[in-house]
């Protein structure tokens, strides 16, 4: 157990210190766990959650086709035309980014919507900084809303055996989707205040031309098929992953035939974030090793002791600790580590783990919005601004992100406990 814990802590420090090498660090650490027999080699294939790996890879491929079709830009144009001034246009874009992000990767969402905000700012000779920040943190907020909204949600679905519909309605009560929407509405009040002085009129004469509607159909088909699959009893464990990968393959073949360009396959497959997939595979093996060594149970006992066996206090510790930790580190390894810990805590207390699961996911997902480095969507947004010649200080970012995040997390914290803790 001590050896496993030491290796895990060294791995985590390295993951923080060398972010560009995280996938290789995780795989190297996983190899050590196997070589030292902390995890038996026969358990390695089952330790990796292949459903999660396939879902993420397939979804990324479909999203790349969706972006290339220019449908997101057309949808953004349609929204802007209905807005009376720049203030409401940016708020609408932030809300739009949030809605898209409930079904599409957060980074991809920022890449879709941010250029529209940049265009608006250039037309009005205004700074795009606040609008890009709003889009980034709004897209990150909605990651917990659906099964496919974020990697952390996909991992929760696998851990708790939740399907797509469970995020909407779970065990006779509103699921995470409605909690996130309530949090989004409250946090939007922060954006209304931030943009209260931006009353310039806005008009966009250019109209985006959608090159292909099939990727939009594919994205909708993915959602529908995931919902249908949730009603199938005794399905194989990688059903959702096969759906996502299968639809991606259909999209690639269709696009290659339509365009007569065989480079589509290479370009789409290249858009899949293999770095994240390798990172996850390594982490899954490490977590399997921690379970085998008994480390997970010990961590659970420590948190349980800190909470004095009181479920509400333990829930509070999990939520706000997750917020603080996710403000500075990637929430993927943190969530992967904590999901089995939460399960062990619930088992020790003899309570339903749902409230603790939901608290963990809300804190880990929303906490990333506190700082510029807490979420990939934030880093992407600031990268776009840097290319446009705008260097954003951490303090300027946090003037918007901190009140936005606290409003969202507090709303989620209260609602989750009222729905699931009482």
Image (tube, rainbow, N blue to C red):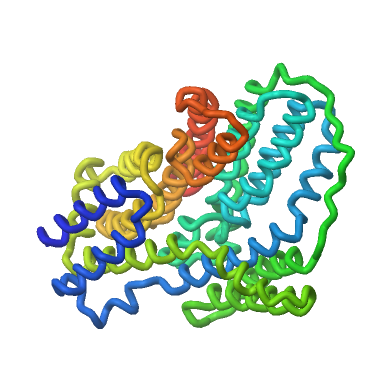
Residue occupying the far top of the picture: 197
Decide: is 204 above or below 34. above
Q: Is residue 121 visible?
A: yes
Q: Nearer the viewer, residue 198 or 256?
A: 256
Q: Nearer the viewer, residue 329 or 95?
A: 329
> Horizontal placement of 293 versus 279: left or right?
left
Q: Nearer the viewer, residue 118 or 378?
A: 118
Decide: is 20 above or below 379. below
Which residue is rendered at x = 74% and y = 26% of the image? 87
Residue 113 position, x and y percent, is 68, 44
Residue occupying the far right of the picture: 205
Residue 60, by quadrant, is: bottom right
Decide: is 306 above or below 217. above
Residue 325 position, x and y percent, is 34, 41
Residue 30, by quadrant, is: bottom left
Q: Is residue 174 visible?
A: no
Which residue is rendered at x = 40% and y = 71% of the image? 49
Decide: is 182 above or below 27. above
Residue 201, by quadrant, is: top right
Which residue is rendered at x = 43% and y = 39% of the image? 373
> Horizontal placement of 1 versus 267: left or right?
left
Residue 73 position, x and y percent, is 76, 49
Quarter of the image that includes the N terminus: bottom left
> Horizontal placement of 228 versus 321: left or right?
right
Which residue is rendered at x = 47% and y = 73% of the image? 51
């Amino acid at each position: 157990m001590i050896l496993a814990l030491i290796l895990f802590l060294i791995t985590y420090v390295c993951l923080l210190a060398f972010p560009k090498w995280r996938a290789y660090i995780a795989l190297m650490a996983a190899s050590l766990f196997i070589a030292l027999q902390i995890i038996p080699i026969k358990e390695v294939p089952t330790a990796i959650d292949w459903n999660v790996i396939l879902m993420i890879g397939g979804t990324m491929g479909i999203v790349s086709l969706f972006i290339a079709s220019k449908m997101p830009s057309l949808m953004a144009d349609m929204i802007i035309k209905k807005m009376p001034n720049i203030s409401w246009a940016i708020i609408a874009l932030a809300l739009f980014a949030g809605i898209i992000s409930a079904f599409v990767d957060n980074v991809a969402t920022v890449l879709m919507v941010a250029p529209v905000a940049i265009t608006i700012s250039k037309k009005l000779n205004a700074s795009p900084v606040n609008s890009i920040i709003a889009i980034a943190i709004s897209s990150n907020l909605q990651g917990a809303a659906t099964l496919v909204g974020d990697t952390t949600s996909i991992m929760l679905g696998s851990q708790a055996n939740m399907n797509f519909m469970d995020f909407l309605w779970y065990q006779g009560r509103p699921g995470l989707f409605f909690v996130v929407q309530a949090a989004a509405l409250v946090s939007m009040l922060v954006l209304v205040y931030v943009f209260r002085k931006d009353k310039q009129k806005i008009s966009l004469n250019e109209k985006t031309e959608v090159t292909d509607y099939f990727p939009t159909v594919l994205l909708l088909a993915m959602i529908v098929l995931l919902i249908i699959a949730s009603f199938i009893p005794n399905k194989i464990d990688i059903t959702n992953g096969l759906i996502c990968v299968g639809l991606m393959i259909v999209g690639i073949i269709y696009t290659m035939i339509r365009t007569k360009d065989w480079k589509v396959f290479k370009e789409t497959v290249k858009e899949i974030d293999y770095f994240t997939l390798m990172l996850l595979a390594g982490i899954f093996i490490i977590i399997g090793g921690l379970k085998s060594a008994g480390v997970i149970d010990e961590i659970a006992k420590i948190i349980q002791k800190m909470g004095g066996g009181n479920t509400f206090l333990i829930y509070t510790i999990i939520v706000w600790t997750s917020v603080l930790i996710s403000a500075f580190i990637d929430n993927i390894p943190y969530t992967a580590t904590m999901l089995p810990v939460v399960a062990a805590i619930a088992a020790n207390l003899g309570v339903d783990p749902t409230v603790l699961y939901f608290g963990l996911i809300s804190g880990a997902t929303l906490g990333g919005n506190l700082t510029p480095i807490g979420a990939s969507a934030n880093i992407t947004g600031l990268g776009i601004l840097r290319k446009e010649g705008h260097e954003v200080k951490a303090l300027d970012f946090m003037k918007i992100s901190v009140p936005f995040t606290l409003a969202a997390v507090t709303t989620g914290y209260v609602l989750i406990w009222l729905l699931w803790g009482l």
